[in-house]
């Protein structure tokens, strides 16, 4: 690991899944389109294959570059790397530095990456005066991966102060090991842990499977294929997950802020709200609030955030998302867990691999090709 040095690693491209489309379709949404907010993309920086971002101390936005570097964006632009683990990860398949997060006090910084063997790893660093303390590094959690794809890798702190970790089903295609519905593995799950509550972490006592001998107690939700990007609504605390589909359907899942966890989003019995390869819908299946098929250009949903900034009043309260292959910025109006409107925002961000939310609620869109753009009013 190197701190405050420039990476010399060659950064490859990422393949998040198959190919094909974006039609705004969902079983519970109206056919009538709503008036879209008028936005533009303002390029604020160019990074080397940016893969994830998070609000940082002092109004900064910290960005992960897939090969293993982390850089801070401020009013002067993108700074030199504040962390470099490029000799500890690889960009083969869908691997690399995949997620970053700060705790609420900006006292600890977390990275989620695949090591040289492909093992998903979450590490913690102490932060003092907005600087990473490299000598405090420790590994919080690891998960072996049977294949090089469907690693998930996103990490976020929830409103409850716990760390949530998204893992895909382990890869290949069609969930050959049945991990999505298997509560005995962390693969295909959203986890919830307390990284400061124990060594290496503690399990919150109100996690839904605590005390179940047949389940991993870290699990918060399951039945996920590749939950590449998820977020919490900064206004309501609701959870939204963009789960990448297999062949036909991309989906966005939702849970209310007062959820007790345990949601089963259906994979691999279901792909979206549709049985997958003759699967049987689980009795406790929670269908997506939005899905779209692959008859057009979309192929891999990129989950975003509910907009809570001030710059674009017409967008406030809407969930902003995109697709890695299609690149079109879209938004959902959600009321009581139901989609009541879908908008095409009329701009294209290229290979949209992730979003970042600044401390002021403004949103940034990350193009894997390098462009980091703020979503501004037109």
Image: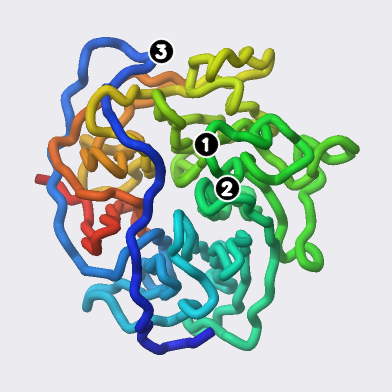
Tell me if I can see residue 164 in this picture. Answer: yes
Q: Circle 2 sits on which residue? A: 166
Q: Position of residue 218 (x, y in %)?
A: 74, 47
Label 1 secondary element? loop
Instruction: Give the mark nearest the N terminus, 2 or 3.
Output: 3
In the displayed structure image, the side of residue 255 where residue 56 appears, left or right: left
Q: CA distance from mark 2 to mark 3?
A: 26 Å
Q: Is residue 220 above or below residue 280?
A: below
Q: Circle 1 sits on which residue? A: 173
Instruction: Give the mark nearest the N terminus, 3 or 1.
Output: 3
Q: Residues within 10 Å of mark 2 (few under 14, many from 20)?
A: many
Hey, which quadrant is residue 278 in on the image? top right
Q: Nearer the viewer, residue 343 or 154?
A: 154
Q: CA distance from mark 1 to mark 2?
A: 18 Å
Numbered disc in front, either 3 or 1: 1
Q: Residue at x 77, y 66 (%)?
A: 200
Tell me if I can see residue 357 in this picture. Answer: no
Hey, which quadrant is residue 91 in on the image? bottom left
In the displayed structure image, the side of residue 67 where residue 117 appears, left or right: right
Q: Nearer the viewer, residue 85 or 110?
A: 85
Quadrant holding the C terminus = top left
Instruction: Give the mark nearest the N terminus, 1 or 2.
Output: 2
């Amino acid at each position: 690991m190197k701190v405050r040095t420039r990476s010399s690693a060659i950064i490859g491209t990422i393949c998040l899944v198959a190919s094909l489309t974006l039609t705004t379709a969902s079983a519970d949404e109206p056919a009538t389109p709503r008036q879209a907010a008028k936005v533009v993309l303002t390029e604020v920086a160019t990074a080397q294959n940016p893969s994830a971002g998070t609000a940082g101390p002092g109004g900064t936005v910290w960005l992960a570059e897939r090969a293993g570097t982390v850089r801070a964006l401020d009013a002067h632009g993108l700074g030199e790397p504040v962390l470099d683990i490029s000799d500890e990860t690889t960009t083969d398949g869908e691997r690399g530095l995949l997620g970053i997060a700060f705790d609420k006090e900006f006292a600890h910084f977390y990275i989620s990456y695949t090591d040289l063997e492909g093992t998903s790893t979450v590490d913690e660093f102490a932060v003092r005066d907005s600087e990473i303390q490299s000598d405090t590094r420790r590994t919080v959690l690891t998960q072996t991966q049977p294949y090089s794809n469907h690693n998930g890798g996103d990490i976020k702190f929830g409103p409850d102060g716990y760390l949530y970790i998204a893992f895909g089903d382990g890869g290949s295609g069609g969930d050959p090991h049945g991990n999505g519905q298997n509560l005995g593995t962390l693969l295909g799950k959203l986890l919830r842990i307390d990284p400061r509550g124990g060594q290496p972490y503690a399990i919150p006592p109100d996690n839904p499977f605590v005390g179940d001998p047949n389940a991993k107690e870290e699990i918060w939700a399951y039945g996920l294929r590749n939950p590449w990007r998820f977020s919490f609504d900064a206004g309501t605390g609701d959870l939204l997950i963009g789960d990448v589909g297999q062949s036909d359907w991309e989906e966005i899942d939702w849970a209310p802020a007062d959820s007790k966890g345990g949601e089963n989003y259906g994979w691999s019995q279901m792909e979206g709200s549709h049985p997958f390869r003759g699967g049987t819908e689980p009795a406790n299946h929670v269908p997506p609030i939005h899905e779209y098929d692959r008859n057009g250009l979309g192929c891999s949903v990129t989950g975003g955030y509910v907009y809570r900034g001030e710059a674009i009043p017409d967008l406030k309260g809407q969930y902003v998302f995109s697709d890695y292959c299609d690149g079109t910025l879209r938004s959902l109006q959600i009321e009581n867990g139901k989609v009541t409107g879908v908008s095409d925002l009329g701009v294209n961000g290229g290979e949209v691999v992730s979003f970042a939310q600044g401390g002021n609620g403004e949103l940034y869109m990350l193009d894997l090709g390098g462009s980091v753009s703020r979503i501004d009013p037109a």
